[in-house]
Image: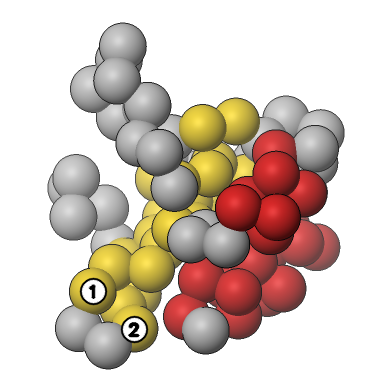
Amino acid sequence: MFGMDCFKANGKAAGGLWQEHMVFKLTDPAVRERALTIEGAHPFDPMGGRPMKEWVVVPVSQSRHWMELAQAAVS
């Protein structure tokens, strides 16, 4: 997906490695909003100008959050 290695849940992409960061599809608005408060996190905008609504980029410097967000992405 978007030229990145990804992981799936129920046959659909739930997250992946984008450059050196992780991106997560967070369908729960409360989880997504919390994720966006992580320092350096931002909406995923792979093509520039059109951020993807449910997707959040979390930088490698915040990798301690990745496991929790991956679990949220597949649930």
Task: List x then y, in percent, for residue 28.
Answer: 57, 62
Mark 2 and mark 1: Cα distance apart in space: 5 Å
Tell me which residue sits at (77%, 49%) in the image. 34
Q: Does 31 sit left or right of 50 as displayed?
A: right
Q: Which residue is mark 2?
A: 9
Q: Secondary structure at mark 1?
A: strand
Q: Residue 73's spot in the image, x, y percent?
A: 51, 71
Can residue 73 be seen by looking at this rendering? yes
Residue furthest out toward the top: 49
Residue at image mark 1: 12
> Residue 48 placed where, x, y %?
30, 15
**Residue at position x 45%, y 46% in the image:** 55
Closest to the observer, 29 or 15? 29
Query: Image quadrant of residue 47?
Result: top left
The reply to whether dot 2 and dot 1 touch (C-beta < 8 Å) is yes
- Count of numbered circles on the image: 2
